[in-house]
Amino acid sequence: MSLVVRSFALCLLLYSVLDIGRCTHTLKQVQVLFRHGERAPLKKEMYPNDPHSVSDYLPWDLGQLTNIGKLREFRIGEMLRARYNDFLGDYYYPKDIYGRSSDSDRTKMSLQLVLSSLYPAKNFQNWNPNLPWLPIPTHYAPENLDILMRPHLCTQFTQHLGEIKRNPTVISLIAQYSELFEFLSTTTGFNITTTTQVYEIYNLLVAQKSMNLTLPQWCTEKIFEDMGNVTVLEYKILSFDKHLKRLNGGTLVRRFVDNMNVTGKRSGHRKLYLYSGHEVNIAAFLRAHDITKPALPVYGTAVIFEKLENATGDVFVKMFVWTGITEEIIPLKIGDCDYLCPIDTYLNIVKDVLPSDKELNCHLDKLSHEDLAHLYDEKISFN
C-alpha cells in the first residue's frame, strides 16, 4: 500500500471516530458547557422524612462540592488540555479564553478547578515554586440577572411553561406516574404533585449516593429508576416546544452562535469559551438541538462545540459530549447533518430556537429597584 493510500485510509479512520474532519479542517474555536461536580444536597431538595440531616453533609455544607466533585472538574480541564494542547498552546494568554459560571458556589468552584488543570503554572508563569497554580479571571452574572443560566427569570418562560403544563398531552405524560407520586407522598412526607418535586428529591438521592450515604429503604432500584424517568420528563417539559426551547436552552445556543462571530461584526476572537452550569443547562442546550442523549447529564458532563474551517474558508461545526463519570467523548449528530456540519446548515437548524434581543432581556421587566439594590449582597449559597 502506497504512502498516499495509507494516509487516506488513516484520514478516513480518524473521520469515523472522535476527530471527525480534522484531516482537512483547521480548528478555530472551542466552546464547552459543563455541569459541576459531585456536591452535597441542596436545602430545597430536603424532605420531612429524610433520614439524613444537615450535619451529615459537613464539612462540605449544603450545595457545596465534595472532594470527589472537585476532582471530577479537575479531570475536565485535564481532558481539554490533552485534546486541545496544540490548539491552545503551552501558556495562558488572557485574550485566548473566557470563563463564566452561574451564580452558585459549586459552579464557580468548578470553573476554577477546570482552569487550574487546563492552565497549570509552569516556566515563566510559575510565580510560586510551592504552588503550581495560575490565577485566571472568571465571570458570572448575579442570579437575578442571569438569563443565560436561569431562564425561569423570564416571565414569558414561566407563563408559557404554565400553559404547557395544562396541555392534555403533558397531563397524560405526567399521569403515567400517578402511583409513584402517591408512593413518594407517603414515604417522603411531602404532597408530591409535580415532576419538579420528584426531580428535586431524585437529585437529593443522587447526591447522597455520591457521598456514600445510605439511601432510605423505600428507595429500591425500581423506584430510583422511575424517579430518573420523571426527571427526564421534567427536562422534556421544560423544552416541550420551540417557544420553550428558545427561552430555555436557546439562550446558550444564541451565545455560542454569537461567540463564533460568523458575521465578523464582533471584534476580538477567543480560542476557548467555558461555561460552568447545571444539569438543567446541559439538558436544555441539547434539547434545543433536538438531542436527548445523555438523558440524565451526570456530574461533570460536558458538551464540547468546535468551530472549524476548511482550506477555502468554509466554516463547519462539530459537537461532542464528555460523559463525566465514565469519561468518554462521544460525537453528536446535529439534526440531519453528519458529524461535521456546515455553518449555514447549522444556523438553519437552530434558527427557530435563537431568542431575540428582546427575549434575552425579558427578565429585566420584573426587576425592582430593591432587587437591583441587593444584587451583590453577601449570601451563602445553599441552593
Image (spheres, helix red, strand yellow):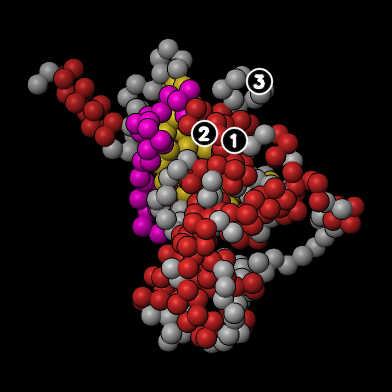
Judge from the rendering whether residue 273 lies leftward or rightward of residue 294; answer left or right: right
Say what secondary structure mark 3 lies in.
loop
- Quadrant in which the N terminus is drawn: top left
Which of the marked residues, 1 or 3, is nearer the chain's N terminus? 3
Q: Residue furthest front?
A: 168
Q: CA distance from mark 1 to mark 3?
A: 18 Å
Q: Are marks 2 and 1 in contact (CB under 8 Å)?
A: yes
Crowd rating for badge 3 (residues with CA inside 10 Å; few <14, some 14–19, many 20+)? few
**Nearest the eye: 316 or 243:** 243
Going by the numbered disc 2, the residue's amino acid type is: Val
Say which residue appears at 55% left-offset and 42% top-offset: 242
**Within 10 Å of the Cα at label 1, are there few (<14), some (14-19), or many (20+) other Cα atoms?**
many
Q: Dot 1 corresponds to which residue?
A: 354
Q: Which residues are magenta?
A: 322-346
Judging by the rendered image, the residue that carries numbered circle 3 is 265
**Percent position (x, y) of residue 317?**
45, 30
Name the front one of labels 2 and 3. Answer: 2
